[in-house]
Image (cartoon, rainbow, N blue to C red):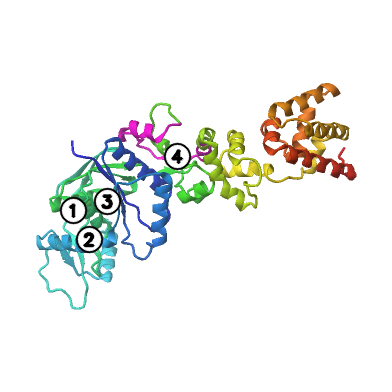
Amino acid sequence: MTMVRTRFAPSPTGYLHLGGARTALFSWAFARHHKGTFILRVEDTDLERSTPENTQVILDAMAWLGLDYDEGPFYQMERMDRYREVLKQLIEEGKAYYCYASREELDAMREEQTARGEKPRYDRRWRDSMATPPAGVSPVVRFKTPLDGAVVIDDLVKGRIVVNNCELDDLIIARSDGTPTYNFCVVVDDWDMQITHVIRGDDHVNNTPRQINILKALGAPLPLYGHVPMILGHDGEKLSKRHGAVSVMQYEEDGYLPEALLNYLARLGWARGDEEVFTMAQFVEWFDLGGISKSAARFNPEKLQWINQQYLKQTDGARLAELAKPFMLRDGCDPSNGPDFAQVAELLRERVNTVEELADAAVYFYRPLDPEPQFLEQHVGQDILPVMAEIAASFEAIEWTREAIHDVMKSTVAAHGLKFPKVAMPLRVLVTGEPQTPSVDAVLALIGKDEVVARLRNQLAKLAGGFIPG
């Protein structure tokens, strides 16, 4: 079998979005599954909209996702000499021709066709013309599309597609300024880079028969094609910003793990039984194009969040701490001043959906938070204040371990004939400012004896000054 060679070929006219990232993932996984080669190619011929900044965003996103490529990145703008060489070849062989039709002529031609109820298209007036070219007109170059026959595509996702050549135009393959067009550059690139499988979005289906005809004219081998259906919003509409269709890098900024996003994208339009959460190694082992759905997938942000949560639960505390630290610092909270952030992260990771949420939840470990009045009113009655003062004194006298903290709370509950929550809840609110945290003894153990006692005494002093609710 021929060595598999796939490519991901984004245009740097905007950020890398979810659809592009999924296409990259499928192309990468197919190459990895077959122990082939994955190539990154930047299609930057749209000079008006392509920018170095957008190119860098694509490279950053590929790096963040861990979609490593074996060759590239190649840039089309650096291959102009090669495209012109192939253009010249096609013209000399009579497979392409100069077209001198002006914009006004083309507009008039289309208006007449529309008036006759015909599909507007170029009428091939310069295809075999012997007329003298008009002076002062810079021609485009058009490809001589076969006039009969059909292009048959055995699409690896969609199945057989047949397009009659009579339905196709004589495609412009070079503009009047000499720059080659997208469809032509792609053909030369896929030929030169020996691409065996083109896996891309199904918005390219209409380009494929045109590209195949050019490849045939060049005598080049044809790759196999697999066109992946679109990703739609949860409402079935085209994915847009209101659905969460943002730059892949926005997900990093929002606290998602790259492996969770990849896992979600892998499941978006591809399935293997009921498998939901799996590693990229497993995905590569299982992946085949036959598992891709023929219909469009729907983006579900809640499902992405759930998968991210599953990954957070399994992630090492030290890595979580490293990822969450920038979020903490942005909020003016330095996690190096306080308990070991890795231990805090491990305590909190099962209660949050994103790294950003983890950072928000960790703040009370590093600075005291005044409880909201409603929390005090709900959980800290005047009758419990002496009990809290007693606990503060007991805490000062113990070795600071989770077990010893729990024992103080348990003995206090027994001594006062209270139920455990009647002590745990006010203690939690006074020390952390929050009504919901992990197990209170675990939280207090991490915050530290001196800090816990200081916070308790500080809050009790404030309440004794006339702020006692109830």
Circle 4 Cα neighbour tier, 10 Å, few/some/many (<14 / 14–19 / ≥20): some
**Residue 399 at x, y = what percent?**
73, 30
- Cα distance in 3D space between marks 4 and 2: 40 Å
**Residue 288 at x, y = what percent?**
31, 34
> Mark 4 near mark 2, Cβ–Cβ under 8 Å?
no
Number of numbered discs? 4
**Residue 93 at x, y = what percent?**
9, 60
Residue that badge 3 annotates = 207
> Mark 2 near mark 1, Cβ–Cβ under 8 Å?
yes
The kind of residue on which mark 3 rests is Asn
Q: Is residue 338 left or right of residue 371?
A: left
Circle 2 Cα neighbour tier, 10 Å, few/some/many (<14 / 14–19 / ≥20): many
Dot 3: element: helix
Eye-nearest disc, 3 or 4: 4
The N terminus sits in image quarter: top left
Q: Earlier in the sequence, mark 1 or mark 3?
A: 3
The kind of residue on which mark 1 rests is Ile
Q: Quadrant of residue 196?
A: top left
Residue that badge 1 annotates = 214
Circle 3 Cα neighbour tier, 10 Å, few/some/many (<14 / 14–19 / ≥20): few
In this view, the residue in front, 287 or 69, is 69
Residue that badge 2 annotates = 173
Q: Which span of residues is magenta-colored?
A: 277-305
Eye-nearest disc, 1 or 4: 4
The furthest residue to the bottom: 135
Q: Earlier in the sequence, mark 2 or mark 1?
A: 2
**Residue 142 at x, y = what percent?**
19, 62
Residue that badge 4 annotates = 259
- Cα distance in 3D space between marks 2 and 1: 10 Å
Q: Is residue 122 above or below residue 317?
A: below
Q: Earlier in the sequence, mark 3 or mark 4?
A: 3
